Amino acid sequence: MAKMIERMLLRFRLSGLGRLRSQKNMIESYLPIREEIVRQRSARAIQWMEFLHEAKMAPLGNAAGRPTATVAAAREAKVQALRDRYRLKEKALAQTRKRAEAKGPLSPEAIAGFEESGRKLVESRDRRIAAILAPSRRSSLSEAEALRKFLEVETEQTEILARKKAALRAKEEKHLDAIRKRAARQIAHLDGKIAALRKMVLERHPAQTGDADLPENVLLRLQNLSMRFGGLLAVDNLSFDVKQGEIFGLIGPNGAGKTTIFNCITRFYRPTSGEMFYRRNAVEVIRLNDFPVHQIIRQGIVRTFQNVELVWELSVLDNLLVAAHTVYRSGFFAQLLHTPGLRREENVLKAKALGVLQTLGLSAYAYAFPYGLPYGILKKIELARTLMANPRLIILDEPAAGLNDKETEELAVLIRKIRDDYKCTIFLVEHDMGLVMDICDTVCAISFGRMLAIGTPAAIQADPLVRAAYLGEAS
């Protein structure tokens, strides 16, 4: 009974620690978004000031032959559109003359008629362009007086506009400074609570390893794992450790049981026998056998599949946001009422998704639909989706399947980058031995569900049992 209460207290305190860290991460992640919102609001206000300034100066500028930038741009657009229309008319006239010449020699009168039509087109075009570019003379003032008045008013209004912009920017900086200070106070307060709660957990709860004496550097342990399908033994008494921060490769011939092992770890299959232990945090090791499949992702374990499994009706960005459903802290009523807290979470997760896409070189596809995208891009999207759930262990099932040599090289760079940037462990099954031997720190070779060898890539390549399984050589 005492042990049960102790475990309940540990779970309660660890849950509280997770909530505090989540609040801190939310504040840190939302701060740059909030700053950008303030800057955009100030930029829109400045644009509106400039528009009003131009609107006020437009009549005087037209009268003085000094159109404002907006008026000048509008006139230039009109002139370009007019030139395009007359270019089409000239082309049509040339085609008409060409067809007439194809029927026989033209008479002098016909030639003169075509030349006269061309000259009239040019004159009409130049006259209309001059009318567009001519200054508007709706003022009773002379041109010199209109110019003098325009320069006086422009100087005065430009100074007023500059003062308003400076005041707005000062207000913006003051607002940003207040936001940063408030966020710093909140983060400092949360840091204190996190440190105190973490100290309490470490002092009052020694490492909870259950039945597994799991070393601190081991993230996942499979112990005597077996999986039987009727009379077929797919996994046979398999045991190995996956260390934190490493890239661990599982290799073997087709039908060796590699994907079955992944399905056991992620609880798609219930193992016939054996134990699976996973270090959820610094003080707690859990037994994965006790968790249903839908709770595995909440422990920080995510995976991809051999086949591309995307929501084809959603954009690439929305596919990533769907994968972040376990990260949301807002409850049912917050979702129902669409509270400000929920909107903040959505902004943060959208910014995170865009950052992940940029990291993986997929920014150009953010708002595209998966239909019709190259297969290599689809595999990258699946890899990007795993990063939205804050993973500690990423399980990749044949990530290089269907990729060409160049795409496989890019994938190797990406896997290392994900491991280093996101501080997670990679556990992969792959048939491309070049990729496995290039990126893996540890390789485990199996055949018919049994362990053949485990060690460094060089040791696996030299192992006679592995060579016999792959190449048919005598051991």
Image (cartoon, grey):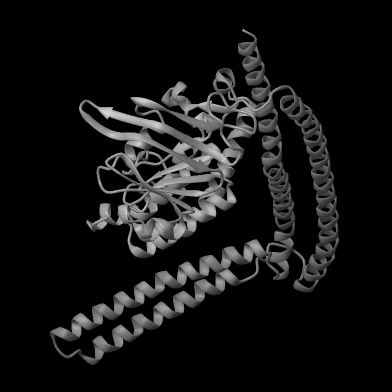
Work out which residue is located at the far left of the displayed protein and give it. Answer: 103
Q: Looking at the picture, does residue 339 appear above or below residue 167?
A: above
Q: Is residue 135 visible?
A: yes
The x and y percentages for residue 268 are: 36, 29
Q: How many marks?
A: 0
Q: Residue at x 45, y 73 (%)?
A: 83
Left or right, residue 168 beside residue 436: right
Work out which residue is located at the far front of the displayed protein and give it. Answer: 475
Q: Nearer the viewer, residue 45 or 182?
A: 182
Split into 4 quadrants, where in the image is the N terminus?
Answer: top right
Q: Residue at x 26, y 32 (%)?
A: 233
Left or right, residue 270 beside residue 422: left
Work out which residue is located at the far top of the displayed protein and give it. Answer: 1
Q: Residue at x 45, y 79 (%)?
A: 123
Split into 4 quadrants, where in the image is the C terminus?
Answer: bottom left
The quarter of the displayed image where residue 304 is located: top left
The x and y percentages for residue 147 are: 78, 70
Q: Nearer the viewer, residue 448 or 359?
A: 448
Q: Looking at the picture, does residue 325 appear above or below residue 242?
A: above
The x and y percentages for residue 116 are: 35, 84
Q: Is residue 270 visible?
A: no
Q: Nearer the viewer, residue 451 or 434?
A: 451
The x and y percentages for residue 320 are: 47, 41
Q: Nearer the viewer, residue 229 or 150?
A: 229
Left or right, residue 446 beside residue 102: right
Left or right, residue 214 beside residue 37: left
